[in-house]
Image: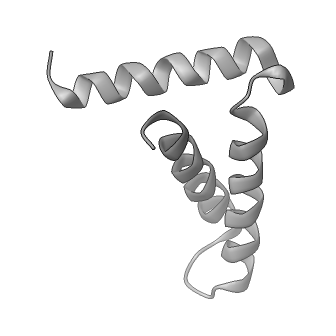
Amino acid sequence: MAKGSDLIEDLREEIVGMAKQGVKHPSTAPVLTGAAVGAVAGALLPVVSLPLGLIAGAAFMIYKRVHP
């Protein structure tokens, strides 16, 4: 199996786990924190919008949780 598909499978498993366990999942708090930081950065930076910052922050944190 290629490395790219391993990453996608790992991300899928993490997201499904977060969806099933909610705030009890160990990745939920860091991902929500990353989303909040991204949203604030998106609100402050003129080129980046709030939703884009939120998505980017959450995506970055979930990636860091799956592949440190």
Does residue 19 sit above or below 33 in this rendering?
Answer: above
Q: Position of residue 48 (x, y in %)?
A: 58, 76
Left or right: 48 with respect to 24? left
**Residue furthest toward the front?**
68
Count of labels in the image: 0
Does residue 39 sit above or below 28 in this rendering?
Answer: below
**The quarter of the displayed image where residue 7 is located:** top left
Left or right: 46 with respect to 29? left
Q: Position of residue 3 (x, y in %)?
A: 20, 29
**Residue furthest toward the left?**
2
**Residue furthest toward the top?**
20
- For the C terminus, the quadrant is top left
What residue sits 48% from the left and 43% below the top?
63
Q: Position of residue 9 (x, y in %)?
A: 38, 19
Q: Position of residue 26 (x, y in %)?
A: 73, 28
**Residue furthest toward the bottom?**
46
Does residue 57 sit above or below 65 in this rendering?
Answer: below
Give the camera-side residue of 40 and 17: 17
Left or right: 20 with respect to 46? right
What residue sits 36% from the left and 26% below the top?
8
- For the N terminus, the quadrant is top left
Left or right: 23 with respect to 16? right
What residue sits 75% from the left and 22% below the top?
25
What residue sits 70% from the left and 54% below the top?
35
What color scheme is it? one colour
